[in-house]
C-alpha cells in the first residue's frame, strides 16, 4: 500500500493564550491535491507555515515520506524538508531574468535543462530573458510555479496563490497549474478561503474552523453531506426552515421530514440550497399535489427576482410565517413582485440538524 507523502498528526499551536491550530491531523498522498479550506483566521495558513518549517508547533509530529521532520525534539529547517512553497506574493527577484529566477538555488549541473523543461511546461519558454516587471500577473504566477518546482519537491504548499489574479485569468491559471503539478507527481496542500477554488482543484477537502478540521472528504461528499449547518452554509447560500421533532419526524409547511435518532422535542434546522427548491404556478389558490419525493407545496409571494447570467434568483415571502426563501432557477425566470407561486423541497437534497438553540 502506498504511504502518504505528507502526514501531520495532532498539531497544536497557541498564540498569546489563544489556540489557533487545535489538534490538526491530515495526510496527502503522492499526486494528490488536498485543499485546506476555511474562513480567514481559522488557522489554515499557520498550519501551512508549520508544515513548511517556518514556524514550530507546540506539539504534534510531521512526516515527509515517512521521515520525521518535526516533533517535540526534532525540527528540520525548511530547506531540509524537500517542500516547495507558493504564496500570494510571487516573490520573484526583480533583478533576475525569468530563467535566473527559476534556476535560483538549484545545484550546479543540469540546471539549464531543468529550467528550459519547466518554462516550456508552464508556457513561458519565450520569456526566459524577460524580467519580472515585464510580465503580467498570470505570467509571474507561471514563473513562480516553475521556480517552486525546479528543485523537484516531494510536496508543494500553496497559500492562496491565485488570489491576486484577474478573475478572467484565474480559472485558466488554476487549471494549468493543476495539470503541471499532477504531471510532476507532486503532493499538494493548497490553502484557500474560496469554496469554488477548492471544489475545482481538490481531490480532498479538509474544512477548517476555529483551528480544527471539522470535516474531510472528496468535494462531492463534503458538499452533499455537510457535518453541520455552518459547513453547508460555507459552500453556498442556504435556506433554513424551523421544526420540532416528534417520533423521529418533523412537521413543516412542506410536509414531514425524517429526523432519525433525534430526541423528541428537539428543535431542528432543515437546510435546503436555493437551487434545490422547485417552483410551480398558483392555480386559483391551490398548488401541486404532494409527492413522496418533494412533500407538500407551500405558497409564497415573490419579493424580487434578479437575473444572474446562467440563472435567476427569486426571493419569496412565505405565507406560513413571513420568512424569506430563495430559489435559483436555470436561465431566465423573472416573475413580478407580488406574484403567488408554490414551492416544493426535494427530500434527497435536505439536511436536518439540531437547532443551534438546542445544542
Image (spheres, rainbow, N blue to C red):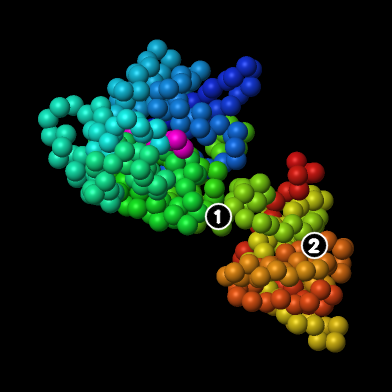
Residue furthest to the bottom: 284
Q: Quadrant of residue 81?
A: top left
- Which of the pair 13/102 is nearer the observer? 102
Residue 246 in sight here? no
Measuring 59% from the left and 52% from the top, which residue is drawn there? Answer: 235
Return the x and y of residue 177 as percentages of the image width and height: 35, 49
Q: Quadrant of residue 26?
A: top left
Which residue is at the front of the view, 335 or 6?
335
Residue under the image location 57 percent in, 41 percent down: 38
Q: Along the horizontal axis of the image, is 263 left or right of 101?
A: right
- 320, 314: nearer the viewer: 314
Badge 1 element: helix
Q: Which mark is residue 324?
A: 2
Disc number placed over residue 223 in the picture, else none? 1
| Furthest-left residue in this view | 109
- Observer-side mark, 2 or 1, equals 2
Task: Give percent across and percent down for residue 274.
Answer: 67, 64
- Asked if 321 appears above or below 261 in the picture, the reply is below
User: How many numbered circles does the render carry?
Assistant: 2
Residue 218 colored magenta? no
Left or right of 282: which side holds 26? left
Q: Where in the figure is residue 126, as x and y percent of width and height?
A: 24, 49
Q: In the image, what residue occupies the spot 52% across and 34% down?
A: 44
Query: In percent of the image, x 28 and y 39: which residue is there?
Result: 98
Say which mark, if any, is on residue 87.
Answer: none
Q: Does residue 75 appear in the picture of this structure?
A: yes
Q: CA distance from mark 2 to mark 1?
A: 23 Å
| Residue range corresponding to the magenta coloring | 84-89
Residue occupying the far top of the picture: 73
Secondary-structure class at tag 2: strand
**Image: 120 above or below 103:** below
Amino acid at each position: 500500500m502506498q504511504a502518504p507523502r505528507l502526514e501531520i498528526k495532532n498539531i497544536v499551536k497557541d498564540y498569546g493564550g489563544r489556540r489557533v491550530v487545535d489538534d490538526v491531523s491530515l495526510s496527502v498522498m503522492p499526486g494528490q491535491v488536498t485543499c485546506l479550506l476555511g474562513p480567514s483566521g481559522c488557522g489554515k495558513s499557520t498550519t501551512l507555515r508549520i508544515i513548511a518549517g517556518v514556524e514550530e508547533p507546540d506539539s504534534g509530529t510531521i512526516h515527509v515520506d515517512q521521515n520525521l521532520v518535526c516533533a517535540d525534539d526534532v525540527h528540520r529547517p525548511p530547506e531540509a524538508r524537500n517542500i516547495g512553497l507558493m504564496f500570494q506574493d510571487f516573490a520573484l527577484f526583480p533583478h533576475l531574468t525569468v530563467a535566473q529566477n527559476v534556476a535560483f538555488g538549484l545545484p550546479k549541473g543540469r540546471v539549464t535543462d531543468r529550467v528550459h523543461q519547466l518554462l516550456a511546461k508552464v508556457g513561458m519558454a519565450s520569456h526566459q530573458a524577460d524580467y519580472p516587471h515585464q510580465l503580467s500577473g498570470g505570467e509571474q504566477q507561471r514563473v513562480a510555479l516553475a521556480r517552486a518546482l525546479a528543485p523537484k519537491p516531494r510536496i508543494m504548499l500553496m497559500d492562496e496563490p491565485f488570489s491576486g489574479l484577474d478573475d478572467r485569468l484565474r480559472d485558466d491559471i488554476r487549471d494549468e497549474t493543476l495539470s503541471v503539478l499532477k504531471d510532476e507527481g507532486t503532493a499538494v496542500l493548497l490553502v484557500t478561503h474560496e469554496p469554488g477554488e477548492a471544489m475545482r482543484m481538490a481531490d480532498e477537502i479538509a474544512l477548517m474552523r476555529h483551528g480544527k478540521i471539522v470535516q474531510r472528504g472528496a468535494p462531492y461528499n463534503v458538499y452533499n453531506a455537510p457535518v453541520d449547518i455552518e459547513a453547508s452554509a460555507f459552500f453556498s447560500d442556504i435556506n433554513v426552515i424551523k421544526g420540532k421533532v416528534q417520533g423521529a419526524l418533523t412537521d413543516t409547511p412542506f410536509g414531514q421530514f425524517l429526523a432519525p435518532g433525534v430526541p423528541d422535542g428537539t428543535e431542528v434546522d432543515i437546510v435546503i440550497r436555493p437551487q434545490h427548491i422547485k417552483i410551480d404556478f398558483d392555480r386559483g389558490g391551490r398548488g401541486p399535489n404532494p409527492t413522496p419525493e418533494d412533500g407538500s407545496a407551500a405558497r409564497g409571494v415573490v419579493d424580487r427576482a434578479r437575473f444572474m447570467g446562467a440563472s435567476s434568483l427569486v426571493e419569496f415571502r412565505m405565507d406560513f410565517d413571513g420568512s424569506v426563501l430563495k430559489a435559483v432557477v436555470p436561465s431566465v425566470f423573472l416573475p413580478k413582485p407580488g406574484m403567488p407561486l408554490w414551492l416544493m423541497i426535494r427530500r434527497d437534497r435536505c439536511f436536518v440538524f439540531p437547532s443551534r438553540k438546542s445544542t
